[in-house]
Image (cartoon, grey):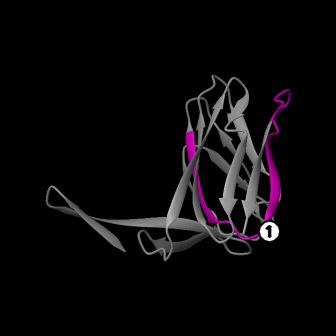
Amino acid sequence: MKRIKRAGVLVALVCGTWSPGIGFGEFVPAGTLDQEEIAVTVRIESRRFIPHVVNLRTGQQVRLILKNEDVELHAFVPANLLVRTNVQVSGNGAPQFGKDEFHRVLIPSGGQVELVFTSKVEGSFPFFCDLPGHIMNGTIVVDG
């Protein structure tokens, strides 16, 4: 558990995780992750994902930061990327989970969401906004 002392107050930081079949409630102390994490930011602007293509490596821990800079609500749907993968979700979005996977997150105007996960499988994985009339998409490419 990572401890920070600020103005005489000791604060313990803990990150929640979501696991397939378990759901929320399992906690991993912040700062105890064994591998180096990379941060990738995807902005949403004018009904576009910027950048359009994100490149990752297999086995790499990723902090995917999604910033909605539009004046409307958007969704981020990563098709098949996070199947049977533990995902830590933070920010002011509304995550939705299916039986075996993180399904999508709704991100309000001006909102930000962070997804922390380890990329497991090589391949090309599309992502998109599935709200009516929003023709927005991109690709996450995971190489070995």
Measured as percent of width and height from the top left, residue 72 is found at 67, 25
Measured as percent of width and height from the top left, residue 131 is found at 81, 34
Q: Is residue 143 above or below residue 110?
A: below
Q: In the image, 99: left or right of 46?
A: right
For image coordinates 49% across by 77% down, the residue present is: 34
- Residue 127 lies within the magenta run: yes
Q: In the image, 109: left or right of 121?
A: left
For image coordinates 68% across by 75% down, the residue present is: 22
For image coordinates 68% across by 31% down, the residue present is: 73
- Residue 87 lies within the magenta run: no
For image coordinates 67% across by 38% down, the residue present is: 51
Q: Quadrant of residue 115?
A: bottom right
Q: Quadrant of residue 10?
A: bottom left
Q: In the rendered image, which quarter contains the N terminus?
A: bottom left
- In the rendered image, the residue lying farthest to the left is 8
Q: Is residue 63 above or below residue 65?
A: below
Q: Main secondary structure of the magenta part?
A: strand
Q: Residues within 10 Å of mark 1 (few under 14, many from 20)?
A: some
Q: In the rendered image, which quarter contains the C terminus?
A: bottom right
Q: Is residue 32 above or below residue 99?
A: below
Give the magenta part as a residue range: 112-136
- Check disc 1 and report the residue beneath it: 100
Measured as percent of width and height from the top left, residue 45 is found at 65, 27
Asked whether 10 or 41 is in front, the reply is: 41
Query: Three-letter amino acid code at disc 1?
Result: Asp
Q: In the image, 8: left or right of 95?
A: left
